[in-house]
Every structure is written in structure tokens, then in C-alpha cells.
Image: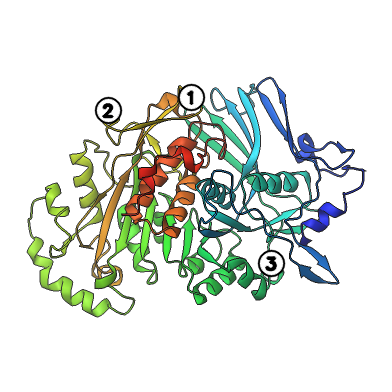
């Protein structure tokens, strides 16, 4: 039966040989003469993370069948404020095996890697690591096994100050892992994922959920482990804690989980996959029309940036469909053949709402910025490539630049987000207009970076969402939150893997944390 992970460590507190490792994790298996900390071996360009079993006072053990909580994990990293918001994340955590190659191999081909990394991964794990480095106090709910991969996952979280007290460990299984081929020539990465043990809703009680949610400013779900996620999200809503749900790709029970979200973030592909609409703009409007509780829907568009549809609170509520329809009907013909000039859409916030389409609005904004690529959905197809790095958006000549540890890697600030006046979006028809209500649309450009500075886009979307979580939890406006996410994602893209390039808060320009 599954148990809290300290018990698995206690079994290995005396000298043992880890003999039953699967071949998949053979590169992580070594004889453990005594408990030691995680260390890294270096052989040329190949770096292999080698875990050692250790006792940790931060996990839960079981005494007489009941869970006994140990002291909580240290709240924050050395660079994070002690009073940062508490963010609870529920979803995947795993190990990534990253191989960087000059070009993607053809069938039956053999080739050498340029470099190889073994490091922590998983959407939720990456997002919480991002948030922790930006100053949040993070807690993760997930399920692993007691293999070498599981130990390395927990140790990496510990280094970043992510509380793993609520991780459930089932012995004798394989923890989640992913093979990732990074193609330098094509600037792509291909993921082959193996899931871990199934997480049953019965494995975490309502009392335990209440404990992990204590003091939380936000609860984030990456769309996996949905049976347990729905249970946690339902209790979070009952406690009045905001819920953010990610829609990356179609998954069992994800539509039900999305219904519980106050904030919804998706990949470029998810809205069309979920709704069957012909383009991303129509799909976004259609999807939001099915989510009456959602305050906003943010969709990342790869190297182009991200688009946010935010409901206007004082004009909309879950029960306002009839009023919305009447108000929209009175001014529907007023738009008529009105010019598509940018200032029409960016009129003052007190201007009367106009009716337009999301596609038309974004075409107008992009034409003004000199970036005309057609439909919203083009150019950002793959979700996990949610590249926040681009050569198209923003004006790098006027943007402030921030140097990273590598002096050659300079990250300019993203261009400021552009927000529309109050609108009604007609992409999906009258019923959707009534269901969505009046909104503002924000387009946040990605960072302007030369392709030569982009090492790997793995986890770029996760870093964007982790930043989004921090923004929501600290009361930033959503447009400012998107700008922070674009910057952090660009920083991530300068390194191989999802986490090495993630910045600490004290290396991020303070202006990106402005709330207004």
C-alpha cells in the first residue's frame, strides 16, 4: 500500500544495495554504502544526477496506521522573501532525460549527443520550482515511487524549497520519467513520457487536503491526476481559495476540473482540441463560454506571445446572460463598418463596449506591430514549445536587457502588454456572446531574442504558468503577470532542460513585479 515517503527512506537508513532498479533508471542506480546527499558526476559533456538515499525530517511517516506530520519544509530559498504567498500545486513531477542532438535522427539512424542531462521535470513540478525561485512558498501534491528517480525528484524539490510533505509514495513502482530529444537544428524537442503509479482519490483524506490548503493564496492544477485534483479543487473552492487550472491536452475528467477554475491557462492547441472550432480565436471564445466560473482564459501562442480574455467583473456575473444579450443587442449595429484602427480597440476604459471578433482584434494589433502571420492558431501549435522567446515581438533596441550568469546570454524585457477596451466577442455566435459577457482582451508579446540564444524550449510553458501563479497570488494585474511570465520563460530558454535557466527573484528586474 502507498505510504508517505519518509518511510521509504527509513528502510534504507542502514547500508544497503539498491539492487532491484529497472533498466530504465540503471544510470541512476549505485551501491549506497551510507545515506548521502544528491551529487552530480561529470564525464565530458554528459552529466548524470546520482541520488543517494537520505533521511529527511520534512516528510510524513506513519505510526500505527495514522499519518504524523513532521516539521514543514523551509519556507523559501535564500533569495526569496519569507513572507511570500503560499501556492499549492497538484499534478505531475518526474525525471527528464534530455539528449541534445545536432538534428533529429531519421529512423534506424545512430548519432551522438552533444550533451546529456538528467533533471527534474513534470508540468506541476516545473511550475512550482519557478514560483519558489520567484519568492513563493510552494507545496506539491503528487505521487511517486521509492525508486532512484523518486528520490532524486524529492531532493531537487528540497533544494528549491518546495514542500514535499504531501507527496504520496508507493513502493515497488516506477516514478514518472520522460525521454526528451532536443533538436538544435530544428529548434524542437520531442518528449516520450512514461507515467508513474496511479493516484487514487482515497489516498488523500479531506482532513489532509484541508491541512495542505491552510494559508494558501492559490491552488494550481496542471490537468493531470484529475480524480484527486477534482477532490482538492472542490475543497479549495469551498474554502474560498482561488483555483488555476491548466489545459495542455485532452485528458480524462479535465473538462470537469476546468469547471472549477477561477483562472484557466491553455496551450495553443487545447482550445481547438476541446471545442472542435476551426481556429484558435473562435475556440478560445467557445471554451470560455462553457466556463461560467472562470474570470479569465489565457492561451499561449508559442513564439508569438500570449492572449488573455478577461471578463469585466462589474458588468458580468454567472447569472447575467440575459442582461448581457440585451445590452449587446442595443449596440450591435453601432459597430457597423467602423474602422479597424488600433485606437478603436484601445479606447479608454469608460468607452461603451463594442462588438468585434477576437481574430479581427488580434489581426489589427499584430498588423500595427508589423507581425502579420494570419490566424491566431498559426505559429504556436505545440503546447510544450510555448516558446516565450521570439524574434518577432517587441523592440529589442529600446528594451532594457538583463545579463544572466552567462555574459553572452542577454535577455531583453518583453514589450508591454496591450489591453483593449471593453468588448463583446462575436467569434462563436450570439449564444457564446451571452455566455462570455463583456471582456477585455490583452495581447502580451514574447521576448525578442535571436534564435542563436535559444538553447531549449522544454518547460517554457511551465515557467510561464509558474510566473502567472505568482502574479495572481500576489495581486498583480493579469497583463503584468503575463509580462513577468514572458520574461521568465525567455530566461529558461537559455539553458538545456526545464529548470537550470529559471531565475531567482533577485535577478529579475523589479519593474516586472509591479502590481498595477
Eye-nearest disc, 1 or 3: 3
Q: Does the image show residue 342?
A: yes
Q: Viewer-proximal residue, 397 or 438?
A: 397
Q: Does the image show residue 279?
A: no
Sequence-first disc among 1 and 3 = 1
From mark 2 to mark 3, how far is it between C-alphas?
52 Å
Spot occupied by residue 355 in the image (x, y as percentages of width and height) = 17, 62
Sequence-first disc among 2 and 3 = 3
Q: Viewer-proximal residue, 451 or 469?
A: 469
Residue 147's disc is none
Spot occupied by residue 322 in the image (x, y as percentages of width and height) = 24, 79
Q: Viewer-proximal residue, 37 or 287?
A: 37
Crowding at mark 1 (Cα within 10 Å: few <14, some 14-19, many 20+): few
The residue lying at 30 percent from left, 57 percent from top is: 282
Eye-nearest disc, 1 or 2: 2
At numbered mark 1, what does the secondary structure look like: helix, strand or loop? loop
Judged left or right of residue 330, residue 324 is right
Q: Viewer-proximal residue, 393 or 276?
A: 393
At numbered mark 3, what does the secondary structure look like: helix, strand or loop? loop
Residue 185's disc is 1
Label 1 with label 2: CB-CB less than 8 Å: no
From mark 1 to mark 2, how far is it between C-alphas?
27 Å
Give the residue number, with chain letter if any, for mark 2: 397
From mark 1 to mark 3, how far is it between C-alphas?
42 Å
**Residue 270 position (above or below residue 287):** above
Crowding at mark 3 (Cα within 10 Å: few <14, some 14-19, many 20+): few
Q: Residue furthest right?
A: 15
Residue 200's disc is 3
**Residue 225 position (above or below residue 371):** below
Spot occupied by residue 144 in the image (x, y as percentages of width and height) = 71, 54
Amino acid at each position: 500500500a502507498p505510504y508517505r515517503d519518509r518511510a521509504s527512506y527509513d528502510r534504507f537508513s542502514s547500508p544497503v544495495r539498491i539492487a532491484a532498479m529497472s533498466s530504465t533508471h540503471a544510470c541512476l542506480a549505485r551501491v549506497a554504502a551510507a545515506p548521502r546527499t544528491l551529487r552530480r558526476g561529470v564525464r565530458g559533456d554528459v552529466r548524470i544526477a546520482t541520488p543517494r538515499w537520505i533521511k529527511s525530517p520534512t516528510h510524513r511517516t506513519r505510526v500505527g496506521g495514522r499519518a504524523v506530520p513532521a516539521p514543514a519544509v523551509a519556507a523559501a530559498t535564500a533569495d526569496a522573501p519569507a513572507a511570500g504567498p503560499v501556492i499549492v500545486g497538484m499534478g505531475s513531477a518526474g525525471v527528464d532525460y534530455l539528449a541534445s542532438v545536432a538534428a533529429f535522427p531519421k529512423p534506424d539512424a545512430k548519432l551522438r549527443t552533444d550533451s546529456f542531462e538528467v533533471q527534474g521535470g513534470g508540468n506541476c513540478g516545473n511550475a512550482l520550482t519557478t514560483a519558489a525561485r520567484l519568492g513563493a512558498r510552494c507545496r506539491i501534491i503528487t505521487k511517486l515511487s521509492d525508486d532512484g528517480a523518486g528520490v532524486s525528484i524529492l531532493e531537487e524539490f528540497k533544494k528549491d524549497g518546495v514542500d514535499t510533505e504531501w507527496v504520496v509514495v508507493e513502493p515497488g513502482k516506477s516514478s514518472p520519467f520522460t525521454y526528451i530529444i532536443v533538436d538544435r537544428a530544428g529548434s524542437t524537442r520531442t518528449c516520450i513520457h512514461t507515467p508513474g503509479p496511479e493516484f487514487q482519490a482515497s489516498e488523500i483524506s479531506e482532513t489532509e487536503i484541508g491541512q495542505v490548503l491552510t494559508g494558501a493564496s492559490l491552488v494550481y492544477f496542471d490537468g493531470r491526476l484529475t480524480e484527486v485534483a477534482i477532490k482538492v479543487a472542490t475543497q479549495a473552492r469551498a474554502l474560498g481559495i482561488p483555483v488555476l487550472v491548466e489545459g495542455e491536452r485532452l485528458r480524462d475528467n479535465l473538462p470537469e476540473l476546468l469547471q472549477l477554475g477561477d483562472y484557466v491557462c491553455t496551450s495553443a492547441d487545447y482550445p481547438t482540441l476541446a471545442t472542435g472550432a476551426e481556429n484558435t480565436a473562435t475556440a478560445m471564445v467557445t471554451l470560455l463560454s462553457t466556463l461560467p466560473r472562470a474570470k479569465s482564459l489565457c492561451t499561449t501562442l508559442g513564439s508569438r506571445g500570449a492572449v488573455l480574455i478577461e471578463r469585466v467583473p462589474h458588468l458580468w456575473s454567472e447569472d447575467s446572460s440575459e442582461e448581457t444579450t440585451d445590452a449587446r443587442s442595443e449596440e450591435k449595429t453601432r459597430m457597423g463598418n467602423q474602422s479597424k484602427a488600433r485606437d478603436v480597440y484601445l479606447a479608454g476604459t469608460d468607452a461603451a463596449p463594442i462588438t468585434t471578433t477576437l481574430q479581427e482584434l488580434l489581426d489589427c494589433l499584430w498588423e500595427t506591430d508589423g507581425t502579420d502571420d494570419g490566424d491566431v492558431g498559426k505559429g504556436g501549435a505545440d503546447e510544450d514549445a510555448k516558446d516565450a522567446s521570439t524574434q518577432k515581438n517587441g523592440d529589442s533596441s529600446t528594451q532594457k536587457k538583463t545579463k544572466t550568469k552567462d555574459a553572452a546570454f542577454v535577455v531583453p524585457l518583453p514589450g508591454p502588454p496591450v489591453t483593449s477596451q471593453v468588448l463583446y466577442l462575436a467569434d462563436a455566435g450570439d449564444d457564446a456572446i451571452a455566455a462570455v459577457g463583456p471582456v477585455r482582451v490583452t495581447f502580451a508579446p514574447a521576448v525578442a531574442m535571436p534564435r542563436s540564444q535559444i538553447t531549449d524550449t522544454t518547460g517554457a510553458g511551465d515557467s510561464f504558468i509558474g510566473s502567472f501563479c505568482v502574479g495572481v497570488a500576489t495581486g498583480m494585474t493579469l497583463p503584468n503577470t503575463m509580462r513577468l511570465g514572458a520574461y521568465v520563460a525567455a530566461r529558461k530558454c537559455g539553458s538545456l532542460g526545464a529548470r537550470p535557466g529559471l531565475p531567482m527573484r533577485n535577478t529579475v528586474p523589479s519593474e516586472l513585479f509591479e502590481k498595477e
